[in-house]
Amino acid sequence: MATTSTRPRAEPPQLQPLAQRLKAWRACRPRGQRIPDELWKAAADLARVHGLSRTAAALKLSYYDLKRRLVAGRVQRRRSVTPAPFVEVAPPALAPGLGERGTVELVQASGARLTLRLPSASASDLLALVHLFLRHRS
């Protein structure tokens, strides 16, 4: 049967420099002054590596304030994805009386979609368009 220890785990040595900076800042700050953003950013960076709870406890910071900073940092790092523009390609001229022979529709994982309705296109014509579509990365 496994036993659990009630002793607190030793904090990682990588947290010590920031803990000292926060201690020095707290000692000389005017009452009511907020923690500088550079210290919050450093704390959030350490929390990504060592865990939120352990970092907040070691640095004597509010768990929820650190969590909010950590989540806000992740949201800001997301890349905005712009939708691909719609491009319509005119089909080749058809001989009179020919109906629509086939439709090919391709969908990429990104959501990009290519629909080809070419009644008299050869396989090589379609293959060239499909290669072009699959090669393009949005």
Image (spheres, rainbow, N blue to C red):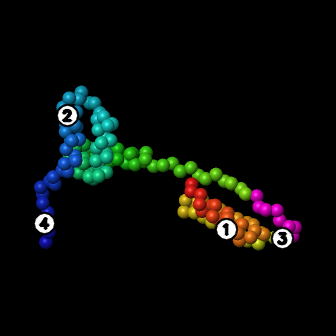
**Badge 3, how many Cα within 10 Å: few under 14, some, many 20+?**
few
The secondary element bearing badge 4 is classed as loop
The part of the image, by quadrant, that contains residue 126 is bottom right
Q: Nearer the viewer, residue 95 or 57?
A: 95
Horizontal and vertical percent position of residue 13: 19, 48
Q: Name the disc covering residue 98, or none.
A: 3
Which residue matches tag 4? 3
Q: In the rendered structure, are the residues bearing label 3 and label 2 in contact, judged by CB atoms less than 8 Å apart?
A: no
* Sequence order check, earlier mark of 3 and 2: 2
Q: Which residues are magenta?
A: 90-98
Q: Earlier in the sequence, mark 2 or mark 4?
A: 4
Residue 56 in percent (x, y) is at: 25, 47
Tell me if label 2 and label 1 are in contact, CB under 8 Å: no
Q: Report, in whole angstroms, how far the alpha carbon at label 1 lies from the one at label 3.
A: 21 Å
Measure the C-alpha gap from mark 2 to mark 1: 67 Å
Residue for badge 1: 127
Tell which circle, 4 or 1, labels the residue nearer the N-terminal end: 4
State which tag comes first along the sequence, 2 or 1. 2
Question: At 79% from the left edge and 62% from the top edge, which residue is drawn?
Answer: 92
Which residue lies under the disc numbered 2?
24
Residue at the image point whose x is 31% and y is 45% from the top: 44
